[in-house]
Each structure stands twice: as structure tokens, then as C-alpha cells.
Image (cartoon, grey):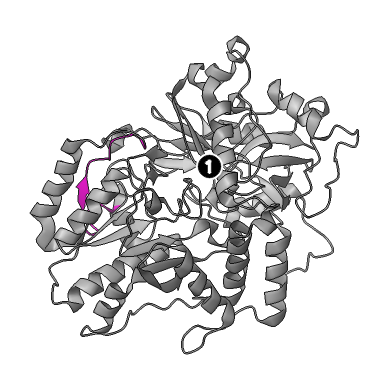
Amino acid sequence: MPVDRSENPLSAEALLDLDRAHVWHPYGPMPGRVAPLLVTGAEGVRLDVRLRDGERTQLIDGMSSWWAAIHGYGHPVLDEAAHAQLDRMAHVMFGGLTHEPAIRLAERLVALTPEPLRHVFLADSGSVSVEVAIKMCLQYQRSLGRPAKRRLLTWRGGYHGDTFHPMSVCDPEGGMHGLWRGVLPEQVFAEEPPDGFDAEPEPAYVAHLADLMERHASELAAVIVEPIVQGAGGMRFHSPAYLCALRELCDEHDVLLVFDEIATGFGRSGALFAAEHAGVSPDVMCVGKALTGGYMTLAAALCTSRVAEGISHGEVPILAHGPTFMGNPLAAAVANASLEVLTNPRLRGGVTWQRDVARIERGLRSGLADARGLPGVRDVRVLGAIGVIQLDREVDMGREQRRLAAPVPRSDLHNAAVPDRGRGPRRDLRGDGGGREGLDQRLTTGRAERISSTASSGESVTCSRSRSLTEALPPSTTASRSQSTRPVQYDEPSSTIGKDVTFCVCTRVSASKSSSSVPKPPGSTMNPRAYFTNIVLRTKK
């Protein structure tokens, strides 16, 4: 019989031993080779962590939980929405039933996304929403009597999820799904789009896209891309002109256009949706991640009336997809609250999300400028609330994870009070009145600890915002800190879009087309194109 441990909590060491014995973590072996960090609580930008020896510390979350927690942890509006909905109904099946949170969410998504997206299919996760989007496209073409149009076109360097069909449109060499070559459907791949959001479009690349579309038009059901920003492919930015070209080519060849906005949606690139940079609309759009503000899993695939009617008039006039937890009322209620916080200036201190993102972008451009001259830095680029420092060498993620989890001398520990975000003031855990001013001084003098991830040539560190980027650079770079003009620093840390999430770190694996040149994470049998770490700076015991 299981033992009730509610009044006898396990030690950190015991929990981590159980974790290693039973829990399979993302992109890792079983059992794990590197112990994860044990989180016991979260608020604002900070995670409360218990170390194996029982010591406690706080860490700044640098990935906003894989780009999802855009308002920070413990946001009062989202907390209240979750509690209120839980008091009414946590879940009910969506087949044959409906409820207000899902109806209002669908209405809100239609109002926010570009015309003519009108219909919303709620899904469990981003990968599942891509599965649904692909299924929509394949069934649409079949319903119109075009069963031969069953392949997809995308460009290299993309990432669309880890379920079956999304894996088939991830980068075929640099991605992590090469193991499944010969099992996955074989899709059509264009070369990576040329770099540069503001760069003039290259006619040769547009011609390359046009040639592929013309040669494969009879077998293409859809084109699917990440618009403007290729996230896991290295935070690469491309010109909106290529989205315009894809729209024209898809219309010309009766091919549907799918935009995967799971990472770019809800303001991250400076537009509410990245498609708006190009002034075009897809036939199908996927959203997720920030949809619930990082509180729980939920995504959606939106489509036009043309797509929905095409499916509904087919031989099988239904979309045969129905997850058990589709339209979960609790997730939908929190998503509504998250979108209200995003779009209602009264819940943002009178500041619109556009002004907030513009402020973040200015801070990134100013604060990251000096990083261009640091050793080991290949490129620095900024777009909206995305800042990227691309490195030129490998960083050992496992070593840094172990280092971060190790006890720290008390003289090196520090913390600060979190500014009041509507939650009330947070206690200064150091107890000596150090406050945020003290933290600022420590970060800019290089006493905050650095963490990064394994990667090879072409690695990049991506940041929403932070205090000191020198802390995230490779050892050879941080060792040369004293030779730089000043530490990289910028203003008040806030969310990628709102006011709470601080600093995103992404390590990117080489863009080499040879999968053999791509290193594996410790103990992994796969070759990931990119993988991530959540934590950047140790702030205090």
C-alpha cells in the first residue's frame, strides 16, 4: 500500500533519487545522467529550488518555461481565474457538450488573429495542434478530389513538434528526428530562408521557392513554416517578403498555407502574430505556449471558412480528431485571463503590450550592443522581445547543470525583493535589506552564477531580457569579462511581453547539414538541432 507522506515530506535527495529511478525527462535518457533541479515554488521571475543537500536557493527562470510564462509565475489575475473555474467545473468532455470558457476563448482568438481565420479547434499541446492542422490540410485536399496532394513543403531549419507528422517537417538533417528517416512521410524541403528581418529579399531564393512549388504542385497539400522567427533552429530571423512570396505561390498552385505561431504568437516578435509583419494571412494557424500564460497545456489550430467548408462537404464530412481533454474548461478559463492581461492596458499598469514590447526591444538593443565585441560571440540580433547572442563554440550543459545544483558559499548568495506586481511586496530572503539595488550591483560586477547548455559551432543564447549577459557566455568569454568595456546590462527585468519573465537562454546546435557533426545531449541517442536550459542566474539562498 502506498505510504502517505503528506506529513513526512521526502528529503531533496530522496526525491531526486526517485526522479532518476522513475521519471523520464524531455530529450534525455532513462535513467537520467544529469540530475534536474528540484523546484518547490515559483513567483514572478524566480524559482524556489531545493538542492540535494537540503539547502535552498532561488533562481531566475531564463526560458519563461519554454517561452510560455509570459506574465511570470503566480500572476494574480490568472490565479484568480483558475481558482474561480475550479470552484465551478474542472473538466467535462467536449464531445456533444460545450461551455462558456471555450466559447469565449474561440471568440477571442478569432478576434485577435488575422482575417479570414474564423474557426477554432482546441488541442492539447502545440505539437497536437500541428497534427490537427496537417490533418485539416490533407483532408481538405482529399475532400476536393485531390488525394494525390498529400505532401508538405517547408524550409530547412524548422521545428514543429515531436509527434509523428510534425517530426516530418522538422529539419531533416540538423533536427533530432533523423532516427525516423524511412518511417516518417517524406516531405519537400526548401533551403533555409536567408538571414535578416530587415534584409532585402533575395530574388534567387524566391525563385528557388517558386521552382519547388511548380515541380511539386500536383502532390503538395500545404506549405508549413514558422513565420519570421525559426525558434529551435537557432532563433534565426528572415524577411517578411518570403511569407508574401509563399502566400502568392500557394494561391497560384491550390496549396494551403500553414503558419506555426506557437512560439511567435501573442506579441513576441513585435507584432501580435508574426504573420502581421508581412500583411498576409495563412489558411491555417497554430497557436500555443503563451496561450495560457504558462499555467497549463492548451493550443489551438485556426482555419478559414474555405478550409472548414471543404472538409465538411467531403466524403467524410467531419474532422476525425477528439482529444479526451479537448477544450478543458480550466485551461480555457486561464487562457481567457491571460489574453485579457495581454490586451487590456488597465491590467498592465496602463501600458499597452505594444509599448511594453517596444520598451523591451529598446532595452535589448542598448543592453546587448557591447556583447558584439566579446570573445566567442558570432552575432547579436534583436526583434521585438527576442534578443539573441549567437556563440561560436560548445558549452557543456551537463557540467553547468551540475555546477548550478552544487551548494554555494553563503558569501556568494544574494537576492532581492521582487517589485510589487499586484501580489504585494516579496520578502527579502537575505534578511539584510539588500533589495534589488544590491542584486543589480552583484549582477553587474559578475558575482551571479552562469549557466548555459551543450552545443557546437553556431550555438546561440537567446534572451527575453536580463541583467548581465556576460554571465551566460562560455568560460573563455566570461574569463575575459574584465577586458570588456562594461558588463552587458539593461533595465528592469520583466516578461517577454509583460512584466515578469526575465531572460531566455537557448543553445543552438550547428547548422551543418551533416547530422554526424551535431553533438548529442549527455546520454542521448538522438541528434538534437537545439535544446535548452531554463535557469540562468542564481539569486539567493
Q: Is residue 206 left or right of residue 400?
A: left
Relative depth, front residue between 384 and 88? 384
Compared with 443, 426 (above or below) is: below
Residue 122, percent across and down?
46, 72
Picture quadrant of residue 492: top right
Q: Is residue 140 left or right of residue 239?
A: left
Q: Residue at x 45, y 69 (%)?
A: 110
> Which image quarter is the N terminus in?
bottom right
Label 1 is placed on what type of residue? Ala
Question: In the rendered structure, which segment of residues is drawn in magenta?
Answer: 180-197
Helix, strand or loop at mark 1: loop
The residue sitting at 58% across, 39% down in the picture is 360
User: Would you say residue 403 sits in the magenta stretch?
Assistant: no
Q: Nearer the viewer, residue 407 or 314?
A: 314
Q: Residue furthest front?
A: 350
323 relative to 511 in the view: left or right: right
Q: Is residue 190 magenta?
A: yes
Determine which residue is flagged by label 1: 385
Residue 132: quarter of image:
bottom left
Question: Where in the figure is residue 275, as x and y percent of width and height?
Answer: 37, 53
Q: Residue at x 79, y 40 (%)?
A: 55
